[in-house]
Image (cartoon, rainbow, N blue to C red):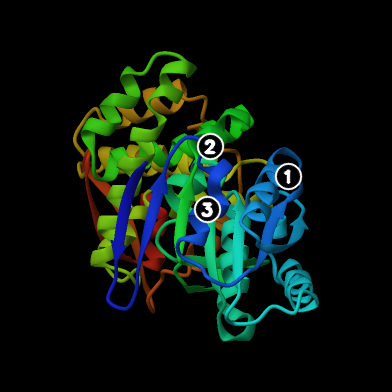
Amino acid sequence: MKTLEIRLSQKKYSISIEKGILGKIGEEIGKIYQNKKIAIITDSNVEELYGKKLIDSLSKNNFKTKTIVIEPGEKSKSLETAKCIYEGLLDFEITRSDMVLAFGGGVVGDIGGFVASTLLRGIQFIQIPTSLLAQIDSSVGGKVAVNLPQGKNLVGSFYHPEAVFIDPELLRTLDKRFLYDGLAEVIKYGCIKDRELFDRLMEIEGQEELFDSMEEIILNCCSIKRDVVERDERDRGERLLLNFGHTLGHAIEKYFEYNKYTHGEAVAIGMYNFTKKSEEMGITEKGATRLIKEIILKYNLPYKMPDIDRDSIIKAIRLDKKNESDNLSIVLLREIGDSFIKKINKDHIDLYLV
């Protein structure tokens, strides 16, 4: 088992990465949680594939469980779905000394953590991420949220789990589109912090080599995020680097009402197009755009800006939750593996759009 410790000013917790850890999850949770009541929040796809295996492991360790199942997809990350989960948890007579277990991809982790952070003013929770995107990114760092019609992740909090358990074997049943969706975030880590990771992704040949390398890839990405979060837990400085590609990506997702592009696909478009523009402006080393295009295509991700109304995209970007007064922080590259944050006036965002 590979383990990382996240040490924050007021909390510490571990990220455990091991193939097959789901089969002994009851034993692992028993090491850190002494009560017996666990509420599981998952989606219908994950519940069908792995729900019984999870329940069996928890039952063997005498945990009393209730499973709350939501519909898969970004549209479930809403206040309406949160209300249904609250009601299910209260029917279970959950207390502040009990445990919520978020078992799914990024949507489940975000809304599960958000509900845990707000019901009864806070219930402890554990993350068991089942998608690559969640395993390397959204399950780590304590950001939990739901969406509003005006934009993504606009209602949320910083609320860290008691532990994160990552089983790379769960990725073998992941739809290939969503495997590549997660790889967009791996590419992001390579672009902003780790040229060796970027080059390693370029070298991988075939799906089996990818899966053979998955534990190390996950560990590498989680290590980068751990280091950044420890230095900037509240997203005021360096942590903003993790949003490379996201400023434009979130706006694209919202424009198409979360139906046309996955999160990773939208981020891939954002990474390519912002870098293309910054390279044209002489900010980014020449050739970076070509390399990003190559790796995006290698992992079956889109790079071309869709045919969309420019004013709508600008409006969505101006509503970004990371805006400060009239300023917007965007992430640009000096070169692959070296990124920085540039503060611009919100009225100038059009200068950075292709």
Q: Secondary structure at mark 1?
A: helix
Q: Is residue 225 left or right of residue 250?
A: left
Give 197 or 188, whichever is nearer the viewer: 197
Q: Secondary structure at mark 3?
A: helix
- Residue 260 in percent (x, y) is at 67, 41
Q: Amino acid at mark 1?
A: Lys
- Residue 16 in percent (x, y) is at 40, 49
Q: Amino acid at mark 2?
A: Asp
Q: Is residue 63 left or right of residue 171?
A: right
Q: Secondary structure at mark 2?
A: helix
The answer to whether residue 245 shows anywhere in this view is no
Q: Residue at x 74, y 69 (%)?
A: 85
Which residue position holds label 1?
Answer: 52
In three-dimensional space, the C-alpha distance between marks 1 and 2, rounded to whole angstroms, equals 26 Å
Give 153 or 271, whichever is nearer the viewer: 153
How would you rate the neighbour count of disc 3 (Cα within 10 Å): few for under 14, some for 14-19, many for 20 or more?
Answer: some
Q: Is the N terminus in the top left, top right, bottom left or bottom right quadrant?
A: top left
Q: Nearer the viewer, mark 3 or mark 1?
A: 3
- Mark carried by residue 166: none
In three-dimensional space, the C-alpha distance between marks 2 and 3, rounded to whole angstroms, equals 31 Å
Q: Residue at x 39, y 53 (%)?
A: 15
- Mark carried by residue 27: 3
In three-dimensional space, the C-alpha distance between marks 3 and 1, rounded to whole angstroms, equals 16 Å
Q: Nearer the viewer, mark 2 or mark 3?
A: 3
Earlier sequence position, callout 2 versus callout 3: 3
- Residue 268 in percent (x, y) is at 46, 38
Q: Amino acid at mark 3?
A: Glu
Which residue position holds label 2?
Answer: 181
